[in-house]
Structures are given as structure tokens and as C-alpha cells.
Image (cartoon, helix red, strand yellow):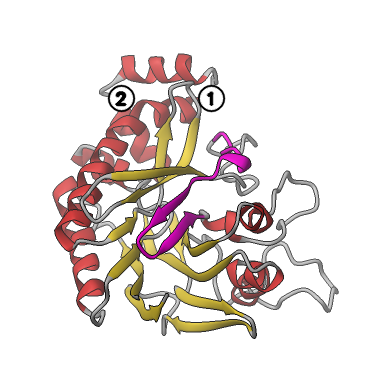
Amino acid sequence: MKLGLVAVQLEVDAHAVASPEQYRGHLEAAAARAIASLGPAEARVVVFPELAGHLALLALAPPAAHKAKTLSAALGAAAVRRPLDVLRGAVTTRLLDPRHAVLAALAPDGERYWRGVFGPLARKHGVHVVAGSHLRLGPNGDLTNASFLFAPDGRLLATTDKVNLVPGMEDRAPKALGLARGEADRLPITETQFGRICTLICYDGFREPHTSEERFIPMGPRVAARGGVTVVANPSANPWPWREPWTYAEPGNAHEPASRELQWEREGLMGSLAQMPFARWGVTAHLVGRVLDLHFDGQSEIVERDARGVRRVARADHHDRGGHVTATVTC
């Protein structure tokens, strides 16, 4: 069967997230443009970037919050009107960090909004949608970086929690988000008409850690041990400059990649598939642009793994502009 694959390279700025209606329109327009560029296909998979759902919290914030200089300050301003929710967030998550309490207070509204955008979007276009990632407050009080998979009829098929957290940013290091890790052995794998699909959120698609001290679980071998998948979705958001020297490179090490772009190619999804044939196709969708103190770069791509190795089927032309990448393949 013919399968259409789409990576939405979503560009974000202050205007895009100025209100819930503005952000919904921005997301729907990006999806419509990408899907319209596909040729005929019996099934279609559309992947949005990581962290796109985190920005829904800013879109939902009152106008005064948008005057802040940083995202943390903006969300703090949004939470001022909801002191009981913030207190409940601190109690629920069992962490005393104010930033974490604010996120826990706001996350449920963000998740409801995210479902309300992407369920209808999947149904409208009749496509499978991997809705990037958002902040999810679990029933046990854990706050995770999570990704929804929606069916073409709008049903929620799976929720995936990110396993490997970027050190100093997502984990419980000082000034990080204090997120909980997903369980590697419980990664959802979903049966569809075109085969099996799973989601590896950004760093989960990498074959090795950025540093030698952190906790890291290579997810490719875990997926392979469960029989592999037809498609692996890889919603991503890279906060480091794409064309500049890689932040964690060891000085004087000739084997280190020269840039984040080359490091991503060697250690990211392409490198993981080269090391372990756990999927036939991989779809990486990057977030790009600037919002308050946040900046994202990256080139979305679609790759194929066969007996000859791994090759790029399609790649975005730019690392700092929005757009989409598409491919029609035969299952």
C-alpha cells in the first residue's frame, strides 16, 4: 500500500502563540499545507515537533503574561491568577520547586487544549497524527514530556512519555523542568493498517547519550526486541545552534562532530537506525524559530532503513525556517 509520510517543520514566534485561537490557526494551517503537498496515498502519517504543546501554555496565558522576557516569567504571570492550582500542583507532584508547581498547575489546561486541536485535525484530514509533545500531569503526580498519537477518526490511540531527559533542561537538576521519565519497557507500539508505529521523542531517538554521567537508555534496541515497527515518529526540538560547534564536544577530540547538525546525523535517529534495524522509516519533525528566551534550529527529514543501510528520502532545505517534508512510500 502507498503510505504518505509528513514531517511538519513548525516555525513559532510571539505572533503564532499570541492567543489560543491564533495558535490553533497556525497549527491547522501548517498541517493543511503539508497534507496538500502529498500525492495519493491509502494511509498518511503527520508528525509535529516536540515542545509545540509546551507553547500552548503560553498561548493560553492572559495578555499580560506575553509582556514577559522569558517563558518562565510568562507562565509565572499566568499562574498568579490561580494560586490554589499552583498550591495543588506543588502538593500533587511532591516537589517544592515553584517552577514545577506552576507547570503542574497549568499542564492539565494545556493538555485539554492540545487534545482539542489535534483530535479534530486528524479527523478532518483523515490522517494519523503524532501531535509533537506537551506537558502531561499523570494521575500519580508525575509531570512528563508526552506525545499523543491520534487515529484518522480522531481517536486517541497512544500516549508516549519521553524516557531520556536532556540533562540540565528536563531532568531534576537545578533550574531544569523537574520532569519524570517514561518507562522504557512500556513504550506504546500501535498496530495500524500500514503496520506498526511508535514514537521516540527527540532524545529517545538517539543511540548514545550526550554526556558520560547521565542516565540514558538506548531505545532502538528496546523497539527491535519487541519486533520492530514500520514507522518511528521522532518529534524533536533542538535548542542549540544547528551549524555551530557541538556544546558537549570534547576539546581536541578529532572524532567529535564539528557541529550540532553533524552530531545529530551521527548519533540521532539516522545513527540509531544504522546501528539497529528497528524501523523501516523514520520521520523527524523539528521545531524552529524564537519565542521569548527560547530558540530552536533543525532540519526535518524522512529516512529509510533497508538491507543496504539507511538513507535520507527527503530533508528540509533550511534549518531556521518553517515548512514541511513529505514522502510517499510503498509498504
Q: What element carries label 1?
A: loop
- Answer with the quarter of the image where residue 285 lies: bottom left
Which residue in the protein does label 2 denote?
A: 80
Residue 60 can be seen, yes or no: no
Question: In the rendering, at what x and y percent does residue 49 appear?
Answer: 40, 59
**How packed is label 2: few (under 14 Cα within 10 Å), some, or many (20 or more)?**
few
Magenta region includes residue 114: no
| Part of the protein shown in magenta | 179-199
Amino acid on which disc 1 is placed? Asp
Q: Is mark 2 on a helix, strand or loop?
A: loop
Q: In this view, does 84 lie to the left or right of 253?
A: left
Q: Is residue 103 left or right of residue 85?
A: right
Amino acid on which disc 2 is placed? Val
Q: Residue at x 41, y 49 (%)?
A: 133
Dot 2 and dot 1 residues touching (CB under 8 Å)? no
Which one is nearer the viewer's eye here, 14 or 238? 238
Q: In which quarter of the image is the N terminus?
A: bottom left
